């Protein structure tokens, strides 16, 4: 029994420890980057791994934000097989321009095979066939100058030395490849297949990585390098050169993971800042709208009065301020008339023609009736205060929309039984966008709920996917995907007998573009400020739909 108690206590302690671990790791991860520059991050990394800063060179570029950093970025290093990236850029660009095709042979081997063998298998003989086909090694280096961002007339002499590049040149090469993928068909796809569990990808499996390593042993030197496109939420380009360092495999893969984590951390910060700015803009729009409404209200002809006790209003009087001057004149005339009648009653009373007390009472009641008849219409309708809280209806509506409970959501509306939000598109790509829109919804109530008789208003900040912005980028993304298919597929798989694209080709390009944009869908989130009006009926408070609300729920598209 004692042993069982000890085991139970140990299990409980272990559960508590395990529950704390994710938080501890998250905080530790944050500390690697919080309030630190990129330079401070990599300096800590080199110190932790015991890496001599003089034996490594590396670079980083964020394709979304343009953030760019280097350590010894302009110093030439032994490249190894990384040179096969710009080499194949030469030939894939020829394919894109129609100068050669995939079956064109060099050294008796089809280029499609040379591409795979030189990138995936890193076959030096296949690469030699390609650079010799340009005329000479120097000619090859001249031809790739635009990819490397150098001018052959002014570039440093080290550029012409066998197999040397700088980190800056390799990042420029990757940037040219990434930003102009349609000009280099199949190359990135082939790099994605290279060394799936080695070098940068030794244990980094969280993101797709298109890379090309370099490995070379000369004497007692071991050169291990890698360059890659890492498909984090904000895709990044990284390169690392090493020269006989301690634990190169561990250092390389840890560097890749560090750069990916650094990017994800700052992507989250960027999105938080963009969300904050979008919310501020939505709030400003709401406040501007409120200011206009208040200005209009100051010049209106209506006021609100409340009659009731401390526990809340029992009735509300809606009063028309128009004609208040005329009402005063009428009351004055009534009082004057009463005075005249009173004087006449006094004379008749002295003559014994009527009893003065009854005459005065009759005069008072009739005068009050006349005054009430004049004042009552100007006060307007007296209504019983509606029960319930309008904010609860707004909250129930948006909570139900987010949960996909459209029946409950539509029950909160006064003028629609359906908004069509439950209807899924027919195409797979359309369903992906529809699902992304549903997942993007979040909201905040902004300000107090304002009641005015049987009406109320509540401001809401609704965060949602900006489908219109997504669709604007989708056109270019589809064209890029289509160009890649054109460069990678034979003609009979692209066109019909009338030389039009096959439906399967356009569908594939569109689906690929949708998937690409949705991989960073948070960049298309926006916040819209809504001014919701509610009305009260026997069923309680209900939202009166308006165009901004409908458009926001549809992702900004016109409803």
Image: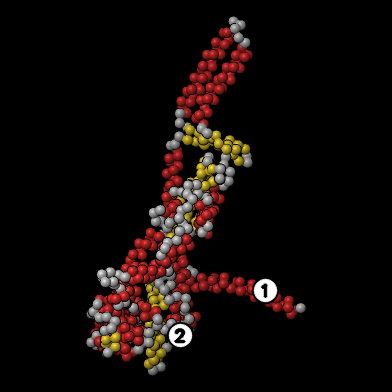
Residue 434 — which label?
none
Q: Give the Cα separation between the discs numbered 1 and 2.
A: 39 Å
Q: Is residue 227 visible?
A: no
| Residue name at image x 56 percent, y 43 percent | 538
Going by the picture, which residue comes out furthest to the bottom?
Answer: 219
**Residue furthest out toward the top:** 351
- Residue 9, by quadrant, is bottom right
* Left or right: where 338 falls relative to 264: right
Q: Are marks 1 and 2 in contact (CB under 8 Å)?
A: no
In this picture, is 294 found above or below 243? above
Give the vertical position of 63 relative to 191 (above or below): above
Residue that carries the numbered disc 1 in the rendered image: 12
Q: Residue at x 45, y 55 (%)?
A: 420
Query: Which corner quadrant holds the N terminus?
Result: bottom right
The residue depicted at 50 percent of the width and 21 percent of the height is 332
Q: Secondary structure at mark 2?
A: helix
The percent coordinates of residue 73 (x first, y second) are 36, 78
| Residue 208: percent from left, percent from top | 43, 76
Q: Residues within 10 Å of mark 1 (few under 14, many from 20)?
A: few
Label 1: element kind:
helix
N-terminal of the pair, mark 1 or mark 2, is 1
Within 10 Å of disc 2 (Cα), the crowding (few <14, some 14-19, many 20+) is some
* Most foreground residue, 403 or 445: 403
Residue highlighted by disc 2: 249
Q: Is residue 236 left or right of residue 156?
A: right
Observer-nearest of 489 and 279: 489
* Residue 147 on image: x %, y %: 29, 77
Query: Which residue: 35% across, 89% down?
Result: 123
Q: Is residue 198 visible?
A: yes
**Furthest residue in direction right, as rendered:** 1
- Residue 347 image point, x, y percent: 57, 8
Vertical side of 342 occupied by 47: above or below:
below
């Amino acid at each position: 029994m004692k042993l069982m108690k000890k085991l139970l206590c140990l299990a409980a302690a272990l559960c508590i420890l395990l529950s704390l671990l994710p938080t501890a790791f998250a905080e530790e991860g944050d500390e690697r980057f919080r309030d630190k520059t990129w330079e401070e991050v990599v300096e800590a990394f080199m110190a932790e791994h015991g890496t001599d800063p003089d034996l490594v060179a590396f670079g980083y570029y964020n394709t979304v934000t343009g953030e760019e950093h280097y350590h010894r970025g302009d110093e030439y290093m032994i490249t190894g097989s990384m040179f096969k990236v710009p080499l194949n850029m030469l030939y894939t660009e020829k394919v894109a321009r129609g100068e050669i095709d995939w079956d064109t042979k060099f050294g008796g081997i089809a280029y499609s095979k040379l591409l795979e063998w030189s990138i995936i298998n890193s076959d030096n003989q296949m690469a030699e066939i390609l650079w010799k086909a340009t005329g000479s090694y120097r000619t090859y280096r001249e031809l790739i100058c635009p990819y490397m961002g150098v001018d052959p007339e002014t570039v440093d002499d080290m550029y012409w030395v066998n197999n040397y590049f700088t980190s800056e040149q390799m990042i420029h090469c990757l940037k040219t490849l990434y930003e102009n993928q349609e000009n280099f068909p199949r190359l990135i796809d082939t790099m994605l297949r290279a060394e799936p569990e080695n070098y940068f990808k030794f244990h980094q499996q969280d993101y797709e990585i298109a890379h090309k390593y370099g490995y070379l042993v000369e004497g007692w030197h071991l050169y291990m390098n890698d360059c890659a496109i890492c498909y984090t939420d904000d895709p990044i380009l990284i390169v690392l050169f090493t020269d006989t360092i301690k634990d190169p495999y561990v250092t390389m893969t840890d560097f890749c993971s560090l750069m990916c984590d650094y990017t994800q951390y700052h992507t989250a910060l960027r999105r938080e800042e963009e969300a904050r700015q979008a919310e501020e803009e939505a709030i400003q729009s709401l406040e501007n709208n409120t200011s206009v409404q208040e200005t209009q209200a100051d010049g209106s002809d209506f006021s609100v009065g409340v009659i009731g006790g401390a526990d809340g209003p029992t009735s509300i009087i809606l009063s028309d301020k128009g004609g208040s001057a005329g009402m005063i004149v009428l009351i004055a005339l009534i009082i004057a008339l009463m005075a005249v009648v009173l004087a006449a009653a006094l004379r008749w009373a002295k003559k014994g023609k009527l009893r003065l007390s009854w005459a005065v009472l009759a005069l008072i009641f009739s005068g009050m009736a006349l005054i009430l008849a004049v004042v009552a219409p100007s006060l307007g309708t007296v209504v019983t205060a509606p029960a319930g809280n309008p904010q609860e209806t707004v909250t129930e509506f948006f909570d139900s929309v987010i949960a996909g409970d459209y029946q409950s959501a539509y029950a909160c509306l006064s003028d629609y039984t359906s908004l069509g939000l439950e209807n899924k598109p027919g195409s797979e790509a359309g369903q992906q966008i529809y699902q992304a829109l549903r997942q993007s919804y979040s909201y905040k109530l902004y300000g107090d709920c304002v009641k005015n008789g049987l009406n109320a208003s509540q401001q809401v900040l609704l965060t949602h996917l900006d489908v219109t912005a997504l669709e604007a980028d989708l056109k270019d993304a589809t064209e890029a995907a289509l160009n890649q298919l054109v460069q990678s597929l034979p003609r009979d798989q692209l066109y019909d007998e009338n030389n039009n694209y096959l439906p399967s080709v356009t569908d594939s390009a569109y689906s690929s573009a949708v998937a690409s944009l949705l991989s960073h869908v948070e960049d298309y989130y926006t916040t819209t400020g809504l001014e919701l009006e509610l009305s009260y009926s026997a069923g309680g408070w209900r939202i009166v739909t308006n165009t901004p609300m409908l458009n926001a729920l549809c992702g900004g598209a016109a409803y």
